Amino acid sequence: MAASFWRSCCSSRRMINQLLGRNVARGVFASLPHEVGWKFLHMTGELLGTPAVKILMPALSPTMEEGNIVKWLKQEGETVNVGDALCEIETDKAVVTMESSDDGILAKIMKEEGSKNVRLGTLIGLLVEEGQDWKQVEIPSDTTDAPSLSPQAAVTAPSPAFVSPLPKKVEHLPGKLQFRLSPAARNILETHQLDASNSTPSGPRGIFTKEDALKLLDQKQKGKSIDAKPVISSLAAQPTGVPSLPPLASMPRPAVPPVSVPAQRASMSAFTEVPASNVRRVIAKRLTESKTTIPHAYATADCDLGAVLKLRQELTKDNIKVSVNDFLIKATAVTLKQMPDVNVTWNGEGPQQLQSIDISIAVATDRGLITPIIKDAAAKGVQEIASSAKALAKKARDGKLLPEEYQGGSFSISNLGMFGISSFIAVINPPQACILAVGRTRMELGIVVDEEGNEKLQQHQLMTVTLSSDGRMVDDELASKFLESLKANLENPVRLALC
């Protein structure tokens, strides 16, 4: 009979309304405890909700820990099929489109557009099956990121059964002393039962020093009216057998008394707190990891770009546009092919030599620095490298890079010459072994010897490059040979076309 009553209540909204009404409530709940009755009402209300499929914040990159909801591409009530684009999520590298893995109707958006720092696994939306009432979707109760301890649980926490026999410590009461005590001053005050609450500290940053305590002790011994009150301390009380300090007159004093500078509170200047984006946080984490775990070594060389600039002018006549950086990428890839010992990465225990030469190029964006990759650069021509670099740089600035377009790489190049920087040192991008920092080209006069053996002055277009290398994989000798080969390849660009 009870089962029949439940089925009739669940199938008819009129009967449910009667169940929640006064007459039925008196008949059904009169004999139930108050808490049980309300739990029963809560369960009855849940029977009206539509079960949903949870949409959780996914991991869209290996280093992603949280993301930002940039834009929802589906609205509540719209039909969603497997593979449909649900929303755009800003990861620690780029803006990636999240696709649906289920069919149904988008019933509820839990994280609106513009939500920042949404942790992985957080509920961001709800799906219901087609044909169900999406407006009556049941909202899960566990929508928070992490459960918090209730005050009742903290109050009713069981106390430990075992009490340590250590000496009882006197707790420090807030407001008793408005300044800090040095260890020596605290010992003097506790030994002689002095009250320093009315004294003025003279130490740096408002610390009550040993000299202040001795001065207070001197005043007590001279018979001034000073109340002897125990100083409340966070240290254990001294045993009764500890001898007291000798009188002040018998204590040796320095020839020159110490000079105490009154403490001054540092002025708080106005500032604006700038929230860090996901990209900025990942950059900070990786830079810290690089500088603290990788033994950096540096080597610098000047490359003559006269032949490269001349070849560029000839290519421009044929409407072929390539930059100095494109020649540099090609020369670096060819040099790595000639010296495979530099084309390595660190796997945690030792170096591993890579078969493919993939050059990571640093691109500055509004979100921070990102390094898209030119795959198999040694097998590509300078013109093909120029097209790839231009397309990747545009996608990086638009935040449209795919994960496979910026993850990996065997060697990095960072060029700040376009910003007028003569030379600089770059930080290695782990787990890679090297990064090449490129400065601007400059004009310099130098002495050259012609075919007849005569010396003469000639202008040179020089560019300074600095190689940062991981000393665990690339030692100083190998780094020097790499720069020597790179310089030779750059100064003979025609040979690059044949490689």
Image (spheres, rainbow, N blue to C red):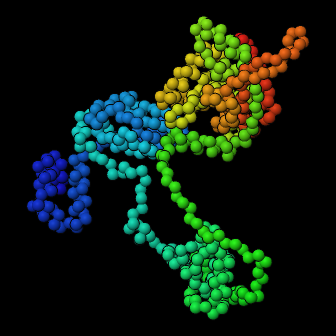
- Residue 348 lies, with reference to residue 19, above or below; the image says above
- In the drawing, does residue 284 fall left or right of residue 155? right
- In the drawing, does residue 476 fall left or right of residue 375? right
Instruction: Give how far across and how far down residue 334 sits, in percent.
Output: 71, 20
- Residue 401 lies, with reference to residue 122, above or below; the image says above
**Quadrant where the C terminus is found in the figure:** top right
**Quarter of image, res 177:** bottom right
- Residue 129 lies, with reference to residue 261, above or below; the image says above
**Quadrant where the N terminus is found in the figure:** bottom left
Q: Is residue 166 visible?
A: no
Task: Tell me the residue at 64%/14% (across/down).
Answer: 381
Instruction: Give how far across and how far down residue 185 sits, in percent.
Output: 65, 78
- In the drawing, does residue 84 fall left or right of residue 487? left
Task: Tell me the residue at 50%/74% (across/down).
Answer: 174
Task: Tell me the residue at 76%/18% (across/down).
Answer: 459
The answer to which of 256 and 126 lies nearer the viewer is 256
Name, please, the residue furthest toward the right.
453
Name, please, the residue furthest toward the top.
318
Name, please, the residue furthest toward the bottom.
223
Task: Tell me the residue at 70%/24% (across/down).
Answer: 442
